[in-house]
Image: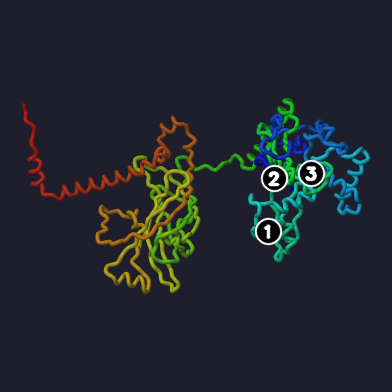
Amino acid sequence: MAGAARCGGSAVYRSRDPVRNLRLRVRIQRVAPAGPLLPRVPPLAGPESPGRADRAADAGAAPLRVTAASRAGAQRPPEDEEEEVEVGWQEKLFSQFEVDLYLNESACQTPLDWQYHEEIRKLEKAGGRKNCRIFTYTDHDRFTNLEELCQKVTDLDHEVPSYLVERMANVRRRRQDRREASSLKSKIITWEPSEEFIKNNHVINTPVQTMYIMGDLGPYGKLGHREYENVLCTIKVDGNGVITVKPDFTGTKGAYRIELDGEKREVWEYTIENASAQVQPEEEEREQRVFRELYGRHRDYLSGLVGSDFEMPLPGTLRLLVNGEIVSAQGYEYDNLYVHFFLELPNQWSSSPFQQLSGVTQTCATKAVGLDNVAYFCYPFTVEMFYTQEDEDSLPQWPVLYFEVLSLDFWQRYRVEGYGSLVLPTCPGVHMLTIPTWRPVGLGPVAEMRRFFIGGSPELEDLTYIRIPSTFKGKRLSRFGFRTESTGSVTFRLCCLQQSRAFLENSALRKHMQSVLDRLGGFSQQSSVYNVLEAFQRARRRMQEARESLPQDLINTSASAVPQPLEP
């Protein structure tokens, strides 16, 4: 390109109308040689959004309007030479260079070249082309292919293409007029693809058509030289109705400027407008009605695919679906970690007989992340449970996930790295939880030496001992003398979904029924209250047992020692 263009950024529009109805009006004017004080061309009327275009009846409007001074036959152009062109989508306007090229039959090689040859001959018989400086390159021209091949990734003047840019330079975007074969190919997998096969099949999925509006800004009398061609506007349209215009329509921002290199440093200004005719209100209403009917039919079609028999749990039952993931484990002493876990269901909870409530992750090596060694498991699991209300007076308990982290080295030395537990979240949604762990520690240095040299360490026979086991029926659970130490932590990602018929009931009926969902809906607060009440009940039982164990005379003495209020 001969010169530097001062243009704005690109703009993206969306249109549901056929892109063939899009029309643009481009006006270019030579102002003066570049200097400190340059006259400005007043901006044209602001463009309309290209969301609407003219109909087929408007397609025959006069596409060009050129001043007499800008015709090729003018003897001497004035100082303010200008030209205005109205061009449609993929409408071909030939430049002087293309006229000279395609008139020569020896230069025509492809069917498109011969088509242009015939069109230019018809133009010559009709008196020549009416455009002078403004012309276009359509999607099938060689310039479009070369422009896509030489696209820059950055805004540097001397850009060095990377390896990826060089590899993607030969990849062409798939055109809208190409049709995918509906029949199955004979070879589904090509085991040894060639370079030509890769280049033809490695395409970007979004179909795109491109059009360039160009300007021949050479000196008068020297039109038709490629070095004076400048891109005035680039329009790209994909298969989804997205229209990209670069630079954007002029509007109230003023004309764009191009300063040419050379001794005179000529300055050109140009404007871009959307010349598409607006749709009539009656046609717009009819179009909206058609779209509403189309969307309604599509909605009915989707409803027919889904059906009306939506699976619902039984009345008074809560379905809890957990899509979980063991993300990572960090902060442990040894490498090659794996996690063994299982889910304990309290009373009034049940699951399908085929539901797997336990699992083991793969063995994962750790890597240094900051100050910790992290093992990324990304192990998914899915659990479906049902809660059925039986006793309205008892507080509901939530399922608990127990897990242990273990390590297994090259010499098959097995070690327990930590134990932990996790109460499933009571609120639906996505939850990221990091659970700290601990492990038992033996007495004296012998246990640690055995752990280091031959593996093995103290471990729990029952993982529910991490918390209060559900099978424990006694009054006291003593852990006196049980030595532990903190180890690392495990990160979980849990996506919880809840379903119940009670969600469909109105507020009055829910208040009257006092169903399980009324109580489970506030379980996030009840969980902490439940823990406090449980601790209070244990303390109360201990105080009562301690009081019963005291001698009876001591209790009577302490009661008689309480001062009594004096009677008046």
Identify the secondary structure beneath mark 3: loop
Q: Is residue 293 visible?
A: no
> Few, some or many C-alpha atoms within 10 Å of disc 1 (few <14, some 14-19, many ≥20)?
few
- Residue 186 is drawn in which quadrant? bottom right
| Residue 129 x/y as whole percent | 87, 39
Which of the two residues, 285 or 515, is positioned nearer the viewer here? 285
Q: Which residue is at a point 47% across and 51% down the rendered structure image?
A: 493
> Few, some or many C-alpha atoms within 10 Å of disc 3 (few <14, some 14-19, many ≥20)?
some
Q: Are marks 1 and 3 in contact (CB under 8 Å)?
A: no
| Residue 462 x/y as whole percent | 35, 60
Mark closer to the observer (1, 2): 2
Q: Which residue is mark 1?
A: 166
Which of the two residues, 36 or 157, is positioned nearer the viewer here? 36
Q: First in sequence: mark 1 or mark 3? A: 1
| Residue 1 x/y as whole percent | 74, 48
The quadrant of the picture occupied by the C terminus is top left
Q: Which residue is mark 2?
A: 4
Q: First in sequence: mark 2 or mark 3? A: 2
Mark closer to the observer (1, 3): 3
- Residue 222 is drawn in which quadrant? top right
| Residue 20 x/y as whole percent | 77, 38
Identify the secondary structure beneath mark 1: helix
Q: Is residue 239 visible?
A: yes
Identify the secondary structure beneath mark 2: strand
| Left or right: where 124 falls relative to 506 | right
- Residue 83 is drawn in which quadrant? top right
| Left or right: where 311 falls relative to 84 | left
The amino acid at mark 1 is: Glu
Q: Name the mark on residue 218.
A: 3
The amino acid at mark 2 is: Ala
